[in-house]
Image: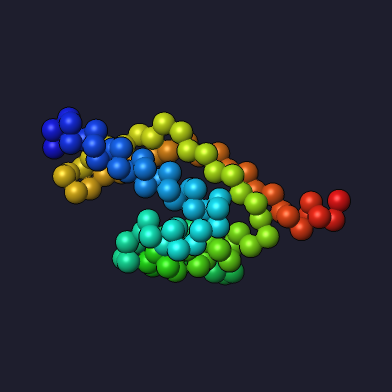
Amino acid sequence: MDDLRKLVESAAIQTLMAKRVRCIDEKDWQGLASVYSDDCKSYSFGDASGTGEATIGGQAIADNTARVLTGLKTVHQVHFPEIEFQSDVEATGIWQLERFSISLDYIRTM
């Protein structure tokens, strides 16, 4: 992959990540589902026993995210990604992430 193509693809990946965190904060679950492929695996949601079973597919990931964030106001900020291309169709990325979660129920009771 030439340098110009890497810049274009890197910008597309960054845009996708920006959409992901915006959709989480806006509670746009359909938008969140759309940033994942049908065969995407997330290990963010284990069951109560801690088995860490994968959640598969965008809709399932969005549904679990909605369940976990019910009653919370969130603010996600991502900064300066490190994106490395393994091939023309595969890349990995590391982002610095800041996340704030506030319980709306807690605020209402104060």
Q: Is residue 61 above or below residue 84?
A: below
Residue 8 visible (yes or no): yes
55 shown above or below 102: below
Q: Residue furthest right?
A: 110
- The image quadrant that residue 30 belongs to is bottom left
Q: Is residue 25 above or below residue 33?
A: above
Residue at x-position 86% and y-position 51%: 110
- Residue 10 appears at what percent x and percent y? 28, 38
Query: Residue shown at 30%/37% (left/top)?
Result: 11
Q: Quadrant of the N terminus?
A: top left
- Seen in the image, is 77 located left or right of residue 83? right
Residue at the spot 48% in from the left edge and 48% down from the top edge:
21
Does residue 51 appear in this view?
no
Scheme of colours in the image: rainbow
Residue 74 in the image, given as x and y percentages of width and height: 61, 49
Residue lying at the far left of the rendered structure: 2
> Does 106 sit left or right of 7 as displayed?
right
Q: How many marks?
A: 0
The quarter holding residue 9 reads top left
In the rendering, at what x and y percent does residue 88 appear?
A: 16, 44
In the image, 42 versus 89, the foreground residue is 89
* Nearer to the camera, 2 or 108: 108
